[in-house]
Image (cartoon, rainbow, N blue to C red):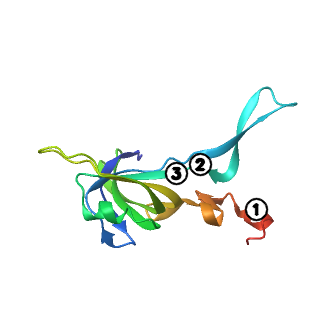
Amino acid sequence: MSNQVPEKLINFRVYEDGNDLLGIADVELPSIEAMTETVKGAGIAGEVDSPVLGHFGSMTLTLNWRTIIKSTVHLAQQRAHNLDLRGAIQTYNSGTGEYKVTPLKVSVRCIPKTTDLGKLDVGTTSDASNEFEVTYIKVFLDGVPVIEIDKFNYICVINGVDYLKQVRQALGLS
């Protein structure tokens, strides 16, 4: 019997355009929150916040830096940035007593919203940060795509289900 216990993220790195290491940061990944509209009326006992298929609210990503570095300023440039967050997840198999490393990759296309230069204080981190609006995100677990959302191209694929395929067809986009 095997019981896979995903324990932790061992480590990760932040890249721009697939190969340029940006520095040491911690990352707040975007929340994926469906756009909803309240449905009420005859035939419904109350109200239902009904999600709009494949449509999501604002998605933000934040990179928190220990100090102000070149990447902090570079990522403030008012253009789209292609970032890859590559990590290694540690999973424990309680049946065999062995550990497994599962690759995680999060690719985003994002536009800068806020650049916080942080604070200056003796002997401490300055806590600089960049906040971005995410227009595209694709998440891979163990090399398999599990989420892809592309707001400008009407793409929403979650666990292999293309939720906007019929919408693209109805709009004459495919």
Which residue occupies 57% across, 45% down? 33
Q: Say if 144 sits above or below 35 in the image.
A: below
Q: Position of residue 31 (x, y in %)?
A: 50, 47
Residue 66 on image: x %, y %:
23, 51
> Which residue is label 1 attached to?
166
SS label for mark 3: loop
Pick whichever, 39 or 3, lies toward us. Answer: 39
Considering the numbered disc 2 on the image, is that residue within a helix, a strand or a loop? loop
Dot 1, crowdedness within 10 Å: few (<14), some or many (≥20)?
few
- Report the residue marked by disc 2: 57
In this rendered view, identify the residue nearer to me: 63 or 91: 63
50 left or right of 152?
A: right
Q: Residue at x 31, y 60 (%)?
A: 72
Number of dots carrying numbers: 3
Do the residues bearing badges 2 and 1 touch, measured as CB atoms within 8 Å? no
Q: Which residue is most to the top?
A: 45
> Mark 2, residues whose alpha carbon is within 10 Å: few (<14), some, or many (≥20)?
few
Tell me which amino acid carries mark 3. Answer: Met
> What's the residue at 80%, 64% (across, down)?
170
Q: Say the numbered circle drawn on residue 59.
A: 3
